[in-house]
């Protein structure tokens, strides 16, 4: 199954599975596989069973610490591991009307102190910067999940590092691996070198030096910390 997905994305590397009308892009098909293990390719224990084994069933809410907002499926990349099947061909993005509803929720709930913006590439939503500035008026801490290459994808994004810094945004960057070969196989040609270039742009403006650029792959950092820190200009913060 996983090899099958890789083959699909390799043949049409800039088109999401949704754009290729693949059956695995259908949410009902995904649920069928997850809930009924309807595949011969690998064995998935039911989610409920894993919760029971961990003593967590039934799951109960304990409160909301972080308000995460997905601004849409549009992205400049089509990574093989993408769990939202994002890509340049995906046009489903959050409207400003929905963002206003989010602002209303945040205004009414002062206990929500951290807002986590994700996507796709959240920066590709045309109302991204407006939304950030509206949230800042409420004096909230903002996290942006940045895929790094978006900063270099178009000149209209070149100033994103300045925008992040001006708004005191915590930037959580993703880079799947510390070698070009494995990163490019997962995310696309030249993604590794563009990611390093974008990291250096963030470093130049102060990110990393002030411990605000993080890599959230803790086991990877733990096992490969020495090698990773040899990449010039890259800062890695262990969670
Ligand atoms: S950068 Fe993130 S959102 Fe975009 S395709 Fe890759 S995993 Fe998905």
Image (tube, grey):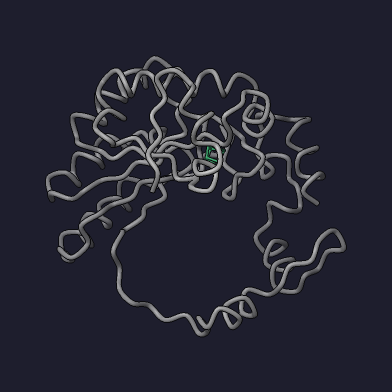
Please report the residue visible at 26 percent of the width from the left and 42 percent of the height from the top: 131
Q: Give the x, y percent position of residue 193.
A: 54, 18
Near-viewer residue (50 or 164):
50
Please report the residue visible at 65 percent of the width from the left and 60 percent of the height from the top: 27
Q: Give the x, y percent position of residue 152.
A: 44, 18
Q: Is residue 139 above or below residue 161?
A: below
**Left or right for 95, reference 74:** left
Q: Give the x, y percent position of residue 50.
A: 62, 75
Q: How many marks?
A: 0
Q: Is residue 6 above or below residue 157?
A: below
Q: Is residue 163 above or below residue 1?
A: above
**Left or right for 41, reference 151:** right
Residue 169: image quadrant is top left
**Left or right for 120, reference 12:** left
Please report the residue visible at 15 percent of the width from the left and 63 percent of the height from the top: 110
Please report the residue visible at 33 percent of the width from the left and 24 percent of the height from the top: 202
Q: Is residue 85 above or below residue 113?
A: above
Near-viewer residue (46 or 106):
46
Near-viewer residue (219 or 148):
219
């Amino acid at each position: 199954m996983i090899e099958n997905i890789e083959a699909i994305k390799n043949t049409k590397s800039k088109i999401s599975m949704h754009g290729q009308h693949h059956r695995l892009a259908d949410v009902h098909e995904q649920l069928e596989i997850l809930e009924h293990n309807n595949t011969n390719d690998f064995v998935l224990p039911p989610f409920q069973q894993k919760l029971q084994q961990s003593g967590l069933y039934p799951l109960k809410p304990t409160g909301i610490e972080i308000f995460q907002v997905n601004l849409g499926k549009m992205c400049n990349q089509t990574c093989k591991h993408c769990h939202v099947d994002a890509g340049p061909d995906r046009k489903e993005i959050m409207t400003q009307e929905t963002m206003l509803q989010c602002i209303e929720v945040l205004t009414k709930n002062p206990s929500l102190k951290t807002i986590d913006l994700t996507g796709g590439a959240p920066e590709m939503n045309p109302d991204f910067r407006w939304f950030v500035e509206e949230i800042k008026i409420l004096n909230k801490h903002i996290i942006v999940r940045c895929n790094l290459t978006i900063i270099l994808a178009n000149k209209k994004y070149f100033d994103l590092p300045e925008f992040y810094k001006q708004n005191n945004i915590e930037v959580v960057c993703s880079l799947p691996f510390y070698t070009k070969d494995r990163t490019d196989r997962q995310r696309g040609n030249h993604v590794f070198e563009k990611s390093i270039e974008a990291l250096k742009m963030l470093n130049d403006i102060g990110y990393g030096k002030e411990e605000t650029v993080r890599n959230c792959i803790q086991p990877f950092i733990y096992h490969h910390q020495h090698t990773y820190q040899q990449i010039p200009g890259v800062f890695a913060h262990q969670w």
